[in-house]
Amino acid sequence: MRTVDFTPLYRNAIGFDRLLNMMEANSNKNTQGGYPPYNIEQQEDNKYRITMAVAGFAEQELDITQQENTLIVRGERQQEDNRNYIYQGIAERNFERKFQLADYVKVMGAGLENGLLHIDLEREIPQAMQPRKIAINQHLLENQ
């Protein structure tokens, strides 16, 4: 009952299709109750770091993929049948977490340290998109 239909907006919005698709995807997102927890940190103007708490996951059980402007982090635990827990407080369930990245943001690297997965991101704006100074030349006005 909480879904929003963006179909009427597609008829009137030219060039905003991607924005509407993002809004629709976010409204239909199936979250896993905040598992695994994560932080997003801005280290510099164009450098960011996502840190996820992935206790119990080995490096080979984690998968990081960037598809266009979406970063997908998956964790798949290998089942261990010979364990008999009296109490199990550490979540060992599989997960998939998606992050929507801004334009020109690239994944620079990732590392696993003390149960924390660090993913470094950087925004690399192309030279043509960066602001540039325009010189004011008086002689252009005189030639007209």
Image (cartoon, rainbow, N blue to C red):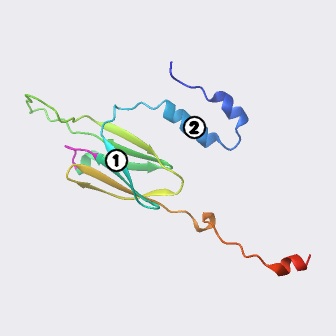
Identity, as a three-letter code, of the amino acid under mark 1: Asn
Q: Is residue 126 left or right of residue 140?
A: left
Q: In the rendered view, would you say 81 is above or below 135?
A: above
Q: Nearer the viewer, residue 74 or 126?
A: 126
Q: Secondary structure at mark 2?
A: helix
Q: Residue at x 31, y 36 (%)?
A: 35
Please tell me which of labels 2 and 1 falls first in the chain.
2
- Residue 51, given in percent of the width and then of the height, sits at 32, 50
Q: How far is mark 2 from mark 1, CA to CA?
A: 25 Å
Tag 1 residue: 39
Q: Residue furthest right?
A: 144
Q: Residue at x 27, y 40 (%)?
A: 76
Q: Label 2 crowding class (10 Å Cα cut-off): few <14, some 14-19, many 20+? A: few
Q: Is residue 126 left or right of residue 85?
A: right
Q: Nearer the viewer, residue 20 or 42?
A: 42
**Magenta residues, as a range?**
53-58
Quarter of the image holding residue 34?
A: top left
Q: In the rendered view, would you say 62 is above or below 137?
A: above
Which of the labelled discs sits on residue 21, or is there none?
2
Identity, as a three-letter code, of the amino acid under mark 2: Asn
